[in-house]
Image (cartoon, rainbow, N blue to C red):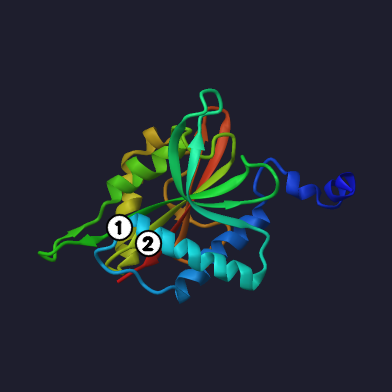
Amino acid sequence: GEAMDTAGYPGLWSDLVPDGSLAQIISLVLDGWDTFKRPASHETEPPITKRFCCWLRSQRDRTRLPLRIDCEVPVLDATAGREVGRMDLTFSYGWHEKVYFAFECKRLNVVDATKRRRSLASEYVHEGMMRYVEGKYARGLDKGGMLGYVMDGDVPAAIGAVGRSITEQRAALKLKNGGLELSSILPDDARVRETRHSFDSRRFVIHHIFVAVG
């Protein structure tokens, strides 16, 4: 019966995504990208993310992870019932609709027709990370994600530019640590970083993944 199911899976009623599931999500994204058909250099975030979402679902099915994966998920205002935004990529855990791990996806190191590179690190901060700071996404949760598509493949340069932009905006980002630091989940993978924030009395960690396109 229902009571037996609830008692048998108490973690599925958690108010937060467990750290163990977060490690599985990050590993799934990294491993999935390694076998994902690389996007074209002119592709924008939405088509890349939609195709990657479908690929991640196939990888999840193969590994049988208990996660739901969706893209462009509407965020509704609980009072007015209106849409206030759309999360690029979400991993839902358990039975509560409000418990999920989201990725805001942004391109970095975009090279135009004249071979000029635009880092887009400022956009990564202002149009990505700030969604969490402002409470538009992951309200009431303790973690969220950023997924950087490094279009020219130079991941170290992209990380460096994003790190500098984060440091410049540390007050607006309400940083609690030094900036873009090695991941506490996967410290040996240079593609994964994290920033720690304090939103009023709530501590929040943004986990950053940088993947090479070019």
76 or 130, which lies in front?
Answer: 76
Residue identified by numbered label 2:
48
Badge 1 crowding class, 10 Å Cα cut-off, few under 14, some 14 to 19, many 20 or more, is some
Please give left or right for residue 31 compared with residue 6 in the image.
left
Residue 119 place in picture, x, y as percent:
25, 55
In this rendering, the answer to whether 172 lies above or below 89 is above
Check the picture and name the quadrant holding the C terminus: bottom left
**Mark 2 element type:** helix
**Mark 1 element type:** loop
Specify the quadrant of the image occupied by residue 117: bottom left
16 or 59, which lies in front?
Answer: 59
In this rendering, the answer to whether 53 lies above or below 40 is above
Q: Residue at x 65, y 57 (%)?
A: 21
Please give left or right for residue 132 compared with residue 154 in the image.
right
Residue at the far top in the pictured view: 79
**Residues at marks 2 and 1, CA–CA distance in whole angstroms:** 7 Å
69 or 140, which lies in front?
Answer: 69
Q: Residue at x 40, y 74 (%)?
A: 37
Task: Give, as a three-letter code, the residue at label 1.
Answer: Thr
Residue 25 place in picture, x, y as percent:
58, 60
197 or 23, which lies in front?
Answer: 23
Residue 44 tag number: 1
In this rendering, the answer to whether 168 lies above or below 151 is above
Q: Residue at x 57, y 70 (%)?
A: 59
Task: Give, as a three-letter code, the residue at label 2.
Answer: Ile
Residue 85 place in picture, x, y as percent:
43, 38
Please give left or right for residue 1 compared with residue 74 in the image.
right
Q: Residue at x 52, y 54 (%)?
A: 70
Specify the quadrant of the image occupied by residue 42: bottom left
Q: Are marks 2 and 1 in contact (CB under 8 Å)?
A: yes
Residue 120 place in picture, x, y as percent:
26, 52
